[in-house]
Amino acid sequence: IDNLNLPNIKMKLSRNAVVTIVALSVVNAEDTFNYRGTSGDNYGPADWNKVSCRNLDDCPGWPDKHLGSIGWKLDENMCVWCPLTGNRCPSNHRMSPVDLVRDRAIEGHPNWKECPDWHWMNFEDGTCEWEDMKGHFEISPHALQIHMPMRNNGDIDCADSDGDRKFPRLDYSKGFPDWWHLDRTDIKVPSEHTQHGKRYAAEVSLAHFYEEGHYKNQIGYVTLFLQDYPGEKPWHYLDKLICEFRREEEKQRSECGLPPAPVYKMCELFRGQERTQEDFEFFEDDATTEDTFGSQTGQLSRPPPMPIQDFGGTPDAKHYPLQLCQGDCDFSEDCAPGLICHLRSANEAVPGCIGGEDLDGDSDFCVFDPFGPGYTPPTEAPTLSPTETSKPTIDPLPPKPLQDFGGTPPLAAFPLQRCQGDCDMDTDCATGLICHQRGSGEPVPGCSGGEEDIKLTDYCVLDPHGVGYDDPDVDTSSPSLPPTTLQPPPVAVPTVRPTSVPAVEDPAVSPVSVDSPAGTPKEVWNRGWEPAFKLDECEGDCDEDSDCLPGLVCFDRESSKVPVPGCAGGEDDNSLTDYCVKPELLQTVDGRDDANPTASPVVATTTPPTVAATTASPTDKPTRRPTSETQTTPSFPDDPLQLTAVGWSPPQDKKPLGVCEGDCDDDDDCQEGLVCFQRFLPMTAVPGCLGGESDTSLMDFCIKDPSVAPSETSKPNAAAPKPTEAQASAPSASAVVVPAVPTDSDIAVSRSEPPPAIDCQFYANQGVNLERICKQDEFACCRNPRSDSNYCHEVYDIFGDSIVSACHHCCQETERGQSLEVGPPNEPKPGLEPYTQCDTLDNTARICKAESCCDPGFAETAYCKEQWARHAGDVERICWYCCYPSKVFTGSSQRNLLSESKNNTRTWEKRHIIMLQDNKSHELLLKLEEEIDFNGITQEAELSPVSDDLPPLHTVMTKQEMRQYHKTNPREIGPEDKLFEHPTMNRTLIVRKENFEPKGLKDEDAYFQELHSAFLQRELQTAYKENYEDVYWWPYEWLLKVGTEYYFRYEGSMTVPPCYTVNHWRVMKDPIRVAAHQIKELERLLAWRLDGKCRASTAGKPRDGNPDAVDVNRPLQEMKRGHRMVFCECQDWPSKFPLEREWCKKWQTRDPEFRLFDNPYNWPQNGF
């Protein structure tokens, strides 16, 4: 009793059992620390500098060992006591934690400091799966900790089926050329850091070590706050982790003879526990459905279980929509209202249904959606009254057979109709359809024959969320519906604002009347921040009038909850979305010049060009600035200039921007005679400028206006010459009569002079989709370098050399209204015959993309081997002539096994075969039955082991068995693996070569979209299994859930002894929202911790009035110059999270106080 240094802690147990356990101080030969005060060799925060450590392997006073501490010298206590007041610490101290202040981001503020970072923190998974993590959860005295499985030599104790051992890793934005690898995840309550004085309920820190020994780059903490909010639903990923901590806790409590901890939600029950009404009252704020124990308030009643009913991979149309426990479904839209499609594997149970565990097939079934609109089973006979649903749905159409036009359908087939292919994207399909990406032998929703189609053809299918689809093969006429009369589109509409462009009034054009609003106004509808189509009335988000349909203007809302004229719902809209409205409704809005449209329609076209005309060719749209007869073209340098990044928001004294300067948002940011060239992908060339191909940002730059040519070089359009021989023999040219095209001499003009004009309408009449050619996205044809897609290859063949003219002149006539440039074709390679059939390949873009068939080390996928077997002898030509830029194929050195796939088709697959006999393991390399020689020679080889003394084949391992084998049998250290000597632990550490992959190999935007889309799908799922085993785990789920890329960056220390000071902190600006009961359970786990002698053992400070909570946070330390703190947010780079882009919208013109303090998060919130 004399050793007591903690008050008695009352522990609440299940069934109202209350046991008092006296918390005893732990008597150790080593020093310890706590968050309370000093008692003997157990030191409080002010005395942490006295905590010593004689043996780093077993030292409770320095708890975070960091096995991966490459190059560190963890033999010195660096703790300094620097509280907010009354300290004598030097100005360059770096003690953590600190209060994080947002005025660091306000330029001109005394606290302002510029953020040097310029992109998000990329993060990638390693080779550990959930089963590997079990047993690596620890309830430490100061934190709940999740350790990455590591061997004593620092090698990660997880392997994939290839034997690779990779840490999860993260890419800091600036100043760190190598990866940071995840070592551990810590959870503390409450938060250690504060944000403008706000302390959060908990703090999660992902501790990383740097892959290379470096005296400045040693520890990296990525930190997130957790906060419970009233009515917030639980985050089941956190519940999954809590269950695993509880399992570790139960091991200790069971050994000590103590009752189990109280029941927690869907975590497993221990030692005869039962869930009682008291348990539900304790967790009454949870929104989780637990049908076994009854429904809770506000949730739907779950129907009773029923047997599954499998209609096969393509159910007949009469079965749609599928009812409860029916399958096979592909999407939730296949199911009746109130149901969702539950994706499963063979022999996996179906929630709320009977028989799934006995079904060998992998059919998916419709199950109850506890948060849906409610489910009503079908009645015996049809009812006369319509059924009310929560949202309109698209009725499924009867299945139809697949129709495959090949990898490159003829232009006449576009747009593809339902069940037609091959499509590459949704825009290949008719309105109301989407492109369904599939694998070999995979069914196609709403179509028949997919199971027999072994090719990788993708087909257009019904879009369940689309605008509807008029199938030409289905009679949808109804006597109750009047026929629809197609009206020709209006020739011209009144301009919204007076124009200074010379106008030519056409008496044949009559004004288009705009009716005044009548009846119920339309609801505002946010169609996305960058919609690819013209917006209708009350739709957003628009940025300018040209984003709206003719007759509408863009209503600019400077703040949230502003009513939208003629529309309903604007006053409830918390976003800054701008909406299209009728211009006459703006007359009541003060200060809008949109309210005065011209009285009659005008056709703003320039007069036909002459030899002395300013423009080289007539334009059919108003020019950007007023044109006068005396206007002179500004003079700019002829030679290309290097790109100059003035900044994401250039100061006013730098505007207007000059040639090759950025970032610009529109043409008005550029000098006269220049336009803003919009770049939609990183590393996109900028016409007339140098450096675009290596610029990884999305910055836009000012370039010389390609539609304006100097008057002294202008000349009449040259006569169109005859088609070339190459065009006449193009694959699709038989269906297209190609008009005369310019010759090479005609095209060889200066950059300031546009290429010769061509008859764009002629090509359009022949079925060439000019809108698609000119569309600026990842599939654009008019870009530099050229596109690899099959469609664009066919376009290049049709136009030949005149593609330069097409991109320049024809793109001006599309909705985009902007001249574009296209890169040159690939240069011939001496001794390599040209390849002219690029458009006939299966999928040229897939073959040519990064880390694919033409890249070393990536040509051994089943897809690539199938392609090279099909085009044996042409591999080098395809990679050189079909890929932009050209790629050099170097072949492959891996061995491969030709195996039978499950649908009995011959596919190439990398296969590992392990022979197990007499407890000895041997890796067996097999020769090929049919071995591909990538130079075009196919040779036969017998199936035989490499070594004759190996035992006979005993078993073929599955992928999961291969992982386990490589986990327990790590490969020998190779010459490319790196060894580091740990100076304090006196041991050699290993980092495998696969952890040293260079950064930047992935398309950052595409990778994020893949991650975020999968995360959103997981957020829609409902957990059904005990311990939340059906909830997906990977170590960086935190960084998706938080929904922000922006953070505080500073240099600090560990927040436990020895307070090591080479720490790089990144603290995310927004908290993760969780349920209150989740925070309570985290607090209880730390407060109830036991040591090896069954004594209460926590470093935490007891919380007044709450026996189930302790505080494990070091007091705030004073922020000094040495911390070098900055706040990185909107002005530093554009976020990829949609809600954050909304939070950042118009940040240049809005008061920073409103964004940073009044509404600080990516959701409506009044202050912190």
Image: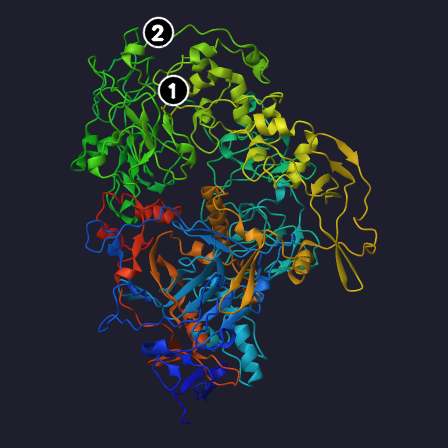
Query: Comparing marks 1 and 2, which lies closer to the viewer?
Result: 2
Which residue position is annotated with label 1?
813
- In percent of width and height, residue 722 lies at 50, 6
| 1019 or 163: nearer the viewer | 163
Q: Secondary structure at mark 2?
A: loop
Q: Name the residue type under label 2.
A: Pro
Image quarter of residue 691: top left
- In percent of width and height, residue 303 lies at 56, 60
Real-space CA distance between mark 1 and mark 2, rounded to the nearest whole angstrom = 20 Å
Number of residues whose C-alpha sits closer than 10 Å to that of mark 1, classed few (under 14), some (14–19) or many (20 or more): some
| 703 or 987: nearer the viewer | 987
| 191 or 319: nearer the viewer | 191
Which residue position is annotated with label 2?
716
Give above or below for 159 relative to 666. below
- In percent of width and height, residue 866 lies at 68, 35
Q: Name the residue type under label 1.
A: Glu
Rendered-image quadrant of the N terminus: bottom left
Number of residues whose C-alpha sits closer than 10 Å to that of mark 2, classed few (under 14), some (14–19) or many (20 or more): some
- In percent of width and height, residue 342 lies at 58, 53
Observer able to see residue 1168: no
Observer able to see residue 608: yes
